[in-house]
Image (tube, coloured by chain):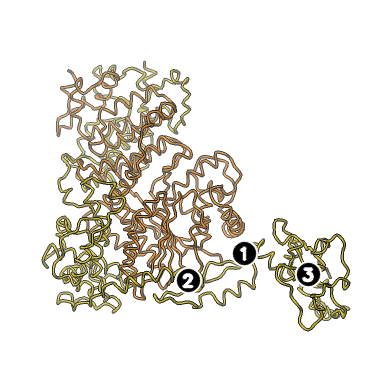
Chain colours: A yellow, B orange
Amino acid sequence: MSKPAEVDISPTASGEASVSSSGTHHPPPQPPPSAAKKKRNLPGTPDPDAEVIALSPKTLLATNRFVCEICSKGFQRDQNLQLHRRGHNLPWKLKQRSGKEVKKRVYVCPEPTCVHHDASRALGDLTGIKKHFFRKHGEKKWKCDKCSKKYAVQSDWKAHSKICGTREYKCDCKTVFSRKDSFITHRAFCDALSEESARAQPQPQPQPPPSLGSNLPVPSPAYDKPSSDRDPQYQTSDAPPSPPTSAAQPSDALLSSIKADPPAPPAIASEMAANTLQVLEEQPARMCHAGSCSSASPSSSSNAQTGNSLTVGLFASSTPSLGLQSQPAPVFTDLIHAMAQSDWSRDHGPSISLEHTSLCLSNNHDGPLSLFGGPDRRQYSTPNPQPAMSATALLQKAAQMGATGGNGSLLRGLGIVPSSPRQPENNPWTSVSLDSEKASIASGLGLGLRCDAGSGLKELMMGPPALFGTSKTTLDFIGLGMAVGSSSNGNLSALISSLGSGIDVAAAAAAPLEGGDFSGKEMGERS
Amino acid sequence: MVMAGMVQDEGSSSVTSSSPLQYFSLMSLSPGSMGSSAYPWLKELKSEERGLYLIHHLLLCANHVASGSIENANHALERISLHASPEGDAMQRIAAHFTEALADRILKSWPGLHKALNSTKIASISEHILVHRLFYELCPFLKLSYLITNQAILEAIQGEKMVHIIDLCAFEPAQWINLLQSLSTRSEGPPHLRITGIHGQKEVLEQMALRLTEEAEKLDIPFQFNPVVCSLENLDLESLRVKTGEALAISSVLQLHSLLALDDETQRRNSPPSVSKSFSSNNLQRILKMKQRTTGEWLEKDPVHIYSPSPDSASTSSPLSMNASTEVNSFLTALWGLSPKLMVITEQETNQNGSGLMERVVEALNFYAAMFDCLESTMPRAIVERQRMEKMLFGEEIKNIIACEGLERKVRHEKLERWSVRLELAGFGRVSLSYSGMLQAGRLLQSYGYDGYNIKEENGCFFLCWQERRLFSVSSWRFRRYE
């Protein structure tokens, strides 16, 4: 059997040079240790004449120190090993507990940076030093299932798991804490909240759903908490107060009361003084997102409260059965409904149709209701003067031209371009499959100056070589050291076609032109 | 003038002799003396031709800049400037901002000059805040992201009594106000909610705290807001004060990519694969210990993810070259160490982190073309806010992508496929975003009449697109423990 490797025995805890012998220097206050219960020293004050033992980290970490020589089974205690040896018919001897007083031992931590490395701070127990070593200097292998706490000592971990998640502290606001400190912190904070809520107005009861809403499935009772009363709350903000909502709002009182409070302008607002920003300033106050076209999830109760159930009916018809039965989804749709309808109810009667969605929003000059509200679209009602081809489409086109062959004329290609490039109509450009006609558009923009004119313009096109050439000589002294791109000195067609590869269009062939190697090289050669 | 007679008429498609190419070449004849007065027909170029012209010359110019031919780059810039304009159509605006960025890059080679030109710039926080607010207002992307994030959070914290949310860039109160509202209607009642907001500017967090606590009071939700004023690189996870027993959710909207700049710097300095100094030493210990486990775990589970230091220092083009010892991975691993129930990440869906300039220019052209297009289609050109946003938000991003290198270049977008690899390496598992999130997002778009925007779903992640082009990705992840 193997014994623990004891590295050295250092002088006593009291720092005396000599090793004190047992039994000779008992200070009067200490009763004999062999009395009924093993006496523990005060923490931090080891027995001054105890034997100090410094174990190596390996020893401390070793789990099974006693190993059977026959079957190599490891044991933590010698006694257990002995009993095991009986099974092998080996000679065994149980060490009796020695009658005479065992010399007191204290242990130091082998980690030099540790406080307990010093003999005067030695720990009194082998198990203790082991645990200390693991806790402080070991890696935390054990992790609690429920929370994220990690432990290095298995027993700590077990102890924690037993109590983790068990309720201990409960605040008035019904939140539960497992730790006292967090509970106390919260409570200090929460008291303020609870006072506030005590002063707040009680929430109004939900109104009965109107007829149109009745064809919708009845939602779970959880959602009858009126969400509309939250609408007006969203109006508080830095924004200039909007005119009060229609009488259909059940919580008008709350609304107007909140509006009456002068909203404290945020620090940011004060910096942004521009008038144009006022409209935008309203936006942050908007609480609801996705105002109107929420789908027909079971939230008819909240819809009903705002009284504008036609929209609900509309949604029901447009989206008959969405599988939004899951818990969280209706929450959002509740809000969306609530926000939307309180919004709409102000501007329109019940005759809103789905098609007029954008209209009603554009008329929404009142409403900082929607949290994720869009820009005030009425400002943007004027379209751009000349609808131009979109930049994306241009890039694709350039890529095509760069990629495909150099015959044909650019103009032919241009002739194909739709003359009214409104965005939706540009979709042909963005779609993956392009016409073969378009695909064969030649003479890319950047491609060889192959002009079919042949009318002496070629000389014109030659131009000064410096134009396209790379005159490195003049610039070397500047020492620019710029990174040379992958397509240095111009395989420009490849560049342009690499534009195409950046776009999700499969039609752009990546092959550079054979002759259309537009670059200074060509020009340089000719000149 | 000869060319005058060759201006193409509307609708005529068979004139072979008047290719616009010739227009370009003519202009190339006298680079220094071009003016619209000399060539009035230049202005009559149709927008499409002009657009193609601009693209061609932008690439040309970028090519020259990349190879160091300043003279030629200068010519190209001059030519572009005739047609580019921040008030024109989408392509003209793009060209204007790109040329500014290219010029900035060129100028950086004269540091004195560059600094002098920027010496009187007034760094205004309010401008910065304004511009981000504009982006939130004018484009639906942030709103969609918040919507989807909140929905995912709501689903993840069902049944939880204590919820802690960490917002890596707490800028827009609307995001959490929306969540508060949703929580207040939860059937089991609202949980105790704690939100820790991180941001570089104190004022922003103060504002946020104000708005959120106000809202929570109204809704009667137990709520705490903890501001953490620091930048993401210097974040000390201890300051987040994550407690045991609470359900943790992290929301990261367009933030992670700036950390990639740190990787560049680390790789440049060829430091050993150790965790950076950016994080406190506590994190260091924790991360190293966690990594030890993770390494073994990974090596036995998934031999594909080999932890070999990448020899190719600056290139990030191959996913396997990302090893675990990068800054971003340290950060992600540290977040993982907090055992979040959910982490929702929104990032730009484009690869802007190439080491070569041309690569970045081409990618940026594609990405920002779509962004500018969507602005062009959704609001008139005259709107000042749009121009402002284009200049101060997109323009600055473009400038950063093109003109900056190293630590300075913070705009390092990467596509979701790359982020997925990093996140999985750090120990996260993907969680599919639910259909209800998609529906709500769709409703938002519908309700505001945003035409042309799409949301696509792939592998449980959402992509916010303009027409067919993916612009942003939203994905959600959870702490994956090993069994």
Locate residue B473 relative to residue A313 in the image: left or right: right
Residue carrying label 1: A140
Instruction: Please tell me which of labels 2 and 3 falls first in the chain.
Output: 3
Q: Chain of mark 1?
A: A
Residue A406 image position (x, y, % from top left)? 31, 30
Asked if B353 appears above or below A52 in the picture, the reply is above
Residue A364 image position (x, y, % from top left)? 16, 57
Residue carrying label 2: A184
Q: Chain of mark 3?
A: A
Real-space Cα separation, disc 2 to disc 3, in angstroms: 39 Å
* Res A513 visible: no
Q: Quadrant of the N terminus of chain A?
A: bottom right
Q: Return the residue found at the far bottom.
A: A36
> Picture quarter containing residue B179?
bottom left
Instruction: Give the numbered dot on residue A47.
Output: 3
Q: Are marks 2 and 3 on the same chain?
A: yes
